Amino acid sequence: MKKVFLSLLGPPGCGKGTQSALLKTYYNIPHVSIGSLIKKMKNDQSSLGKEIRTVLQNGKLLSGKNVNYLLGKRFQENDLWNGAIFDATPCTIETANMLSSVLQQKNQSLTCCVLFQINPALLYKRVLGRLIHPQSGRIYHRTFKPPKVQMRDDITGEALIQRKDDTKGILNKRIAQYMKYKEIMENYFQKKDQLIKIDASLPPNVVFQKIISSVSLALKK
Ligand code: ADP
């Protein structure tokens, strides 16, 4: 049986994390956030840890080789074989090929790559108002998804924070990085007939419905 393996690509702030949380519950599959895997290693004293600190400070991309290493390690945890959501991955052909061959070993393949399309002006509003609950990764927004109690997580009541890299300067760099690989990955998945484009400026529940109906079509291919 075909399992659901999704790649979510889009600029920072387009809603990948928000949709991942919904898709994770809906399909009951893990959410693999490369951003989180990277951040977990940020205090590591290895050369990888050092590269990660530079990457995070400058809004840069981690090299394909190191992303493959982190992803390979994540696959070893053995919980990804019934489907998974790869958030902000792959950003390079190197990682896309790696992902495809890892899945192939288990007779699986990527169901589709969901490309989030959005007007850049909206990204600033979304990122600069983003609040997170660091312990769970729950995502809020000062205006678009305010918590019930100001600056407190709805479930635990713990404090919400603003991400350190959610500043205008770093956001500009991250958008520029995204623009460099967007076309390459879009062409890659288009050629493989695995590309789904979604209007990410719509409200979260509408975006979600559009994704699941496109995924169910992709599963029938
Ligand atoms: P990404 O993971 O792509 O960086 P997030 O999912 O963290 O993006 O969303 C960025 C911010 O925008 C968050 O504060 C989130 O609550 C808000 N957001 C996400 N999707 C939408 C949407 N469809 N409409 C309005 N706000 C949204």
Image (spheres, helix red, strand yellow):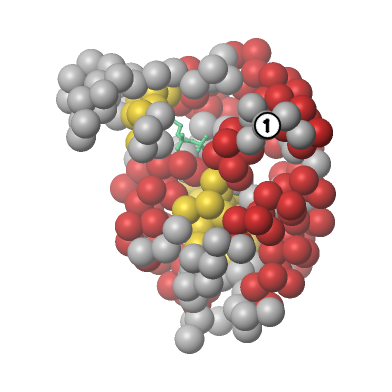
Q: Position of residue 88 (x, y in %)?
A: 60, 46
Disc 1: residue Cβ within 8 A of ligand 1's nearest atom: no
Against 157, is 80 above or below? below
In this image, 29 relative to 10: left or right? left
Q: Position of residue 119 (x, y in %)?
A: 55, 32
Against 181, is 82 above or below? below
Q: Quadrant of ligand 1?
A: top left
In this image, 53 relative to 144: left or right? right
Residue at image x 73%, y 20%?
58
- Is residue 157 shown to the viewer in this render? yes
Mark 1 burial class by Cα count in 10 Å: few <14, some 14-19, many 20+: some
Q: Residue furthest left?
A: 148
- Is residue 174 shown to the viewer in this render? no
In this image, 79 relative to 169: left or right? left
Residue at image x 42%, y 24%?
130
Residue at image x 68%, y 78%?
104
Depth order, front residue of 205/31? 31
Q: Quadrant of the C terminus?
A: bottom right
Against 203, is 45 above or below? above
Question: Amino acid type of disc 1?
Answer: Asp
Q: Find disc 1 in the rendering and name its residue.
A: 44
Q: Position of residue 39 (x, y in %)?
A: 59, 33
Against 102, is 93 above or below? above
Mark 1 element type: loop
